[in-house]
Image: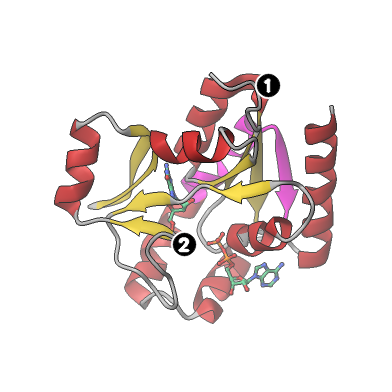
Amino acid sequence: MSDKKGKLIIFSAPSGSGKSTIIQELLKRDFNLEFSISATSRAPRGEEKYGKDYYFLTPEEFRREIDADNFLEWEEVYQDTYYGTLKSEVERITSKGNNIVFDVDVVGGVNIKKMYGEEALSLFIQPPSIEELEKRLTNRGTDSSEKIIQRLKKADYELSFAPKFDKIIINDILDNAIEQTASELTHFLNR
Ligand code: ADP
Ligand code: 5GP
């Protein structure tokens, strides 16, 4: 194994909390971060591209990757919709010495932290309220009202996972949440 392995930063939160927004901002900064592109069986939404946002797979292709034991972790995050981190993705990024950023559901986040311990920092991005979460999902304009309801239904369950994370970042004022996250990263990567 190479000795120039990067570290791991895990972001989890209910959908619409602002994870992607915060991650996109941090990727521009000088933290040597690279985004872990997950595989999913859901369809691309908005401007999403294969190999940039996700590896979009059919349910059959996703099943084949499971059977081949190619996932570090995977979850059926919503009914009939699968998401997972490919082992090859983690190796691709960490072997370059880059720090890897995961955007995963709360169960995946807790599992990855357990696997990597002190080499990983797990961050929970918390919305100020469920009402605000609904507003953000609606304003984002990428999901049908049915999909938004499905996501909101899961939010209470997901919020109950917050204490299992290393740090909780409240994303009320976006700039504050970004700076707080940047400060946690500086501390973690320099220690
Ligand atoms: P997630 O990746 O957690 O699903 P997104 O980053 O896509 O969430 O954010 C959901 C929506 O909320 C986006 O339209 C984004 O621009 C908006 N948003 C993110 N953070 C804030 C904030 N602090 N205040 C208001 N809107 C926000
Ligand atoms: P979205 O459909 O909004 O992109 O993602 C829905 C949920 O799936 C989010 O909570 C996101 O973090 C999660 N997710 C994305 N990729 C993975 C993954 O590889 N593993 C797990 N466990 N969850 C993921």
Q: Position of residue 14 (x, y in %)?
A: 53, 54
**In this view of the protein, which residue sits in the foreground, 68 or 105?**
68
Residue 185 sits in quarter: top right
Residue at the (81%, 65%) spot, across then down? 175
- Residues under labels 1 and 2: Cα distance? 28 Å
Residue at the (40%, 33%) spot, across then down? 87
Residue type beneath disc 2: Lys
Residue at the (53%, 18%) spot, across then down? 1
Mark drawn on residue 97: none
Mark drawn on residue 52: 2
Q: Is residue 162 magenta?
A: yes
**In this view of the protein, which residue sits in the foreground, 102 or 82?**
102
Q: Which residue is mark 1?
A: 118
Left-right relation of 3 to 58: right
Please rate how many residues cluster around mark 1, counting C-alpha atoms within 10 Å: few if below 14, some from 14 to 19, many from 20: few
Left-right relation of 71 to 34: left
Q: Earlier in the sequence, mark 1 or mark 2?
A: 2
Residue bounds of the magenta highlight? 156-170
Q: Secondary structure at mark 2?
A: loop
- Indicate yes or no: mark 2 CB to ligand 2 under 8 Å: no
The answer to whether residue 115 of the structure is visible from this angle is yes
Residue at the (65%, 33%) spot, across then down? 6
**In this view of the protein, which residue sits in the foreground, 45 or 142?**
45
Left-right relation of 51 to 67: right
